[in-house]
Image (cartoon, grey):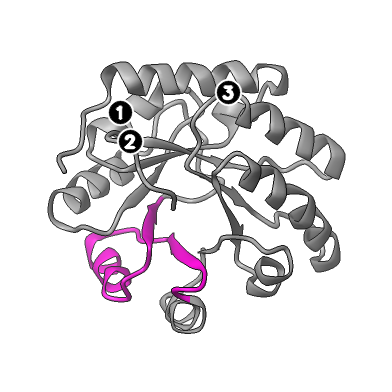
Amino acid sequence: MSVPKDRCRLVLIVPDIADIDEQAKVLADALRGGDVASVIIPQYALDDGTFQKHAEKLVPLVQETGAAAMIAGDSRVAGRAKADGLHITGNLAEFTEAVEKHAPKLIVGGGNAADRHHALEIGELRPDYIFFGKLEGDIKPVAHPKNVALAEWWASMIAIPCIVMGGTDPKSTLEVALSGAEFVALRMAVFADPAAATSIVAEVNALLDEKAPRFED
């Protein structure tokens, strides 16, 4: 993850759009809205070859803005597309293998930690970040309360940064920021109305600038 500001920063999760040109345009529009720390690119239902083509188109778009481009799950795609990192959604064994094989050459982080015990198991691997929630977990306007609570506990005692999956309402970012999380991830909150993606990213950054707590050095 790129160097943080002194408050919670935005992470974007690329939406599930099969048309590669449309997906790239929507993402580029969002990135024009302001500060984005990183972008996670999931495979969704794409076959491996098509996912590779999407990644090779999207990764440079992300990197041109200074954000980190993260490929979800596939280290081969990440390597070929020259992505910055690998987002792991699998089990602890997969996470362990990814850290051992690819860190520190690639940023390696992820989650699926549903409770404190599993979060601490992931923490012992010393990933670059831990993710609370699922990449497609934005099914309500607010962030899942359990994930916010985990982030509050984690941020209060562990130095490894955390990302929390936000809700479908852009204002859910503030609730996440108040937990002490370093990053908040948005997907449908930004991309449900592609024409508004630029302005929503700008609004989220303005909200976080104004109301998010500041981190101590």
On screen, 209 above or below 67? above
Image quadrant holding the C terminus, namely: top left
Tell me the quarter of the picture where residue 20 sits.
top right
Q: Return the x and y of residue 46 as percentages of the image width and height.
A: 79, 58
Q: Which residue is mark 2?
A: 8
Residue at (54% x, 63% y) in the render: 85
Which of 148 and 53 lies nearest the eye of the viewer?
Answer: 53
Q: Residue 128 vs residue 81: left or right? A: left
Residue at (33% x, 25% y) in the render: 174
- Labels 1 and 3: the sequence-earlier one: 3
- Labels 2 and 1: the sequence-earlier one: 2
Q: Which mark is residue 33?
A: 3
Tag 3: Cα neighbours inside 10 Å, few (<14), some, or many (≥20)? Answer: some
Q: Which residues are magenta?
A: 103-132
**Is residue 33 within the magenta segment?**
no
Q: Return the x and y of residue 120 as percentages of the image width and height.
A: 24, 68
Evaluate if marks 2 and 1 touch, with contact meaning CB atoms under 8 Å apart. Answer: no
Tag 1: Cα neighbours inside 10 Å, few (<14), some, or many (≥20)? Answer: some
Mark 1 element type: helix
Mark 3 element type: loop
Evaluate if marks 3 and 2 touch, with contact meaning CB atoms under 8 Å apart. Answer: no
Q: Looking at the picture, which amino acid does disc 2 mark?
A: Cys
Q: CA distance from mark 3 to mark 2?
A: 16 Å
Q: Looking at the picture, which amino acid does disc 3 mark?
A: Gly
Mark 2 element type: loop
State which mark lies toward you, 2 or 1. Answer: 2
| Residue 177 visible in the snapshot | yes
Q: Looking at the picture, which amino acid does disc 1 mark?
A: Glu
Q: Which residue is mark 1?
A: 175
**Is residue 126 within the magenta segment?**
yes
Which of 112 and 158 lies nearest the eye of the viewer?
Answer: 158
